[in-house]
Image (tube, helix red, strand yellow):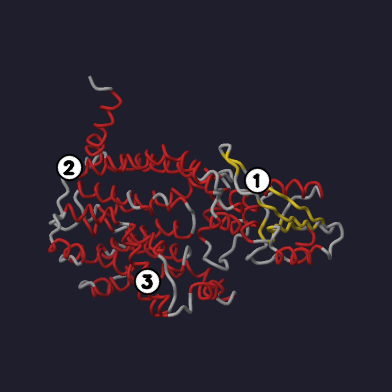
Amino acid sequence: MRFAPVAALRRLPAVFREAVTDPARADSTVLLSLVAYVAIWTVYGTVAKAPQGLHPDMVEIVAWSRDLSLGYLKHPPLAAWLVAAWFAVFPVTEWAYYLLAMLMPAVALWLAWKLSADYLTPEKRVAGLLLLTLVPFFNFHALKYNVNTVMMPLWAATALAFLRSYRTRGIGWAALAGVCAAGAMLTKYWSVFLLLGLVLAALIDRRRMDYFKSLAPWVTVATGALALAPHIVWLVEHNFAPFTYAVAVHGEKSIATTAVSVLGYLGGSVAYVAIPLIAAAVMAAFKPATFADMAWPREPERRLAALAFWLPFLLPAVGAIVGRTEITSLWSMPAYTLLGVLLLSPDGVVVRDTDTKRLIAAAIIVPLAMLAASPGIAWMAQRKGPPPQSAQAFLLARQVEQAWRQMTPAPLRFVGGEADLAYGIATYAPDRPRALTDMPPPDAEELARAGAAYVCLAQDQGCRLKAAELAVKVPGSRTVESSILRAFLRTPGQPQRYTLILVPPQL
């Protein structure tokens, strides 16, 4: 007699397939599955990354969220706005942040599921969704909340609304396409490749005259421009500072450097989706004619969807060569909404029920296996020695707050010094201070009235000298030397010394 739980687990793929291919139960089953997906990967991230602390990109966005603005030095503001809204409800904890991060790919997966209904049979829809869950962008990489992660649902929503507005000429879909496109641009300017790609797709399609004679494209443009207008005004007022930053960091590269980065972008992007590519090739029986139909479909609707996939994905390579800039495959994260449609829509691709059951089993086993392995991953990360600046951030924030309280009863409102340290303290400190690094400076009188804490690595002489120059002008300033060693699972991490320079409020 079989052990009941084991037998139930073996039957789970068949039961899930039956539910998700049933039109009456499909959407609710997918939604419940995505809730479980988010929960499992959130717990995995919380446990596996526990000794590492939050990634510098994540604490930087928290710091931005404390200074809400229509734009920032590096990126547009939407990612910071979402963080501000999220932590107005949730506590500033690592599990809550990973939960927010995992909501981004989950929403993208839901939108990919809804979009696939326009092109795929129920069996193929399920297979397409499951294949996306096996792409690292939708789990491992998504746990690091940043502008690339936030683009995932916005690109998906824009593609869905655009394709439906093109087919139906519906004003509602057209307006939604404009708003979602603006949201994508308000997340990262990389989204210009999405907008340009969709425009080119519309122009290449044979039905372009009917589309452009309708109100749909002009409603999309009008709503998108209206949503972007405040940020455009901010850009003009700040001399397009994010573009200057982007060129300084990624631009003006040699032809050889650009070529290598483009090859890395294309090769790395293909590697990330290797599992879906291999699975689709098997389902297509490795027939060249079917591969050709995947890449360049015959039917107008499928061809438009293929263009909406290929152009936003390939245009960055062209842009990098023309602009002599560096790009990386991680930036292709939001581009895969239509991957399932591209790979599975040809008639030559046959998805059998056994194929679906195997994909369901893989989609269940992978996250559960990673969840089971998460304590071991955390232990190995601790043995390797995570960067002290991230791993010790919450302990450092506690020390800064304690030293500040010993000097003044006033709340800690500003923290400066080394950028990543300031962002970490801004994230973890109970007073929720604002960071002074790479942010618009507060009014001089406001800063003087509030005071500030400047935090440097003890070996960073440049940071220490700059902070000391500010402190020497204010009576009562203090310098505190600190040393932190964080242990995890009884395994000590790397010790690190810090210098805290505290400038008291000037009442």
Closer to us: 33 or 429: 429
Quarter of the figure with the C terminus: bottom right
Badge 1 is on which residue?
A: 485
Which residue type carries mark 3? Val
Residue at figure coordinates x 31%, y 70% from the top left: 311
Q: Which residue is mark 2?
A: 353
Q: Nearer the viewer, mark 1 or mark 2?
A: 1
Name the residue located 79 percent from the left edge and 58 percent from the top edge.
503
Callout 2: helix, strand or loop? Answer: helix
Q: Residue at x 63, y 47 (%)?
A: 394
Is 362 drawn above or below residue 423 in the view shown? Answer: above
> Does dot 1 land on a helix, a strand or a loop?
loop
- Residue 121 image offset from top left, x and y in percent: 19, 50
Measure the C-alpha gap from mark 2 to mark 3. 39 Å
* Front residue of 325 and 97: 325
Residue designated by label 3: 262
The amino acid sitting under disc 1 is Leu
Residue contact at pointers 2 and 3, CB within 8 angstroms: no
* Residue 314 image label: none
Q: Quadrant of residue 478?
A: bottom right
Quarter of the figure with residue 414: bottom right
Q: Between disc 1 and disc 2, whose residue precedes?
A: 2
Q: Position of residue 474 (x, y in %)?
A: 84, 62
Mark 1 vs mark 2, CA separation in Å: 54 Å
Q: CA distance from mark 1 to mark 3?
A: 41 Å
Q: Quadrant of the N terminus?
A: top left
Give the crowd class for mark 1: few <14, some 14-19, many >=20 residues within 10 Å.
some
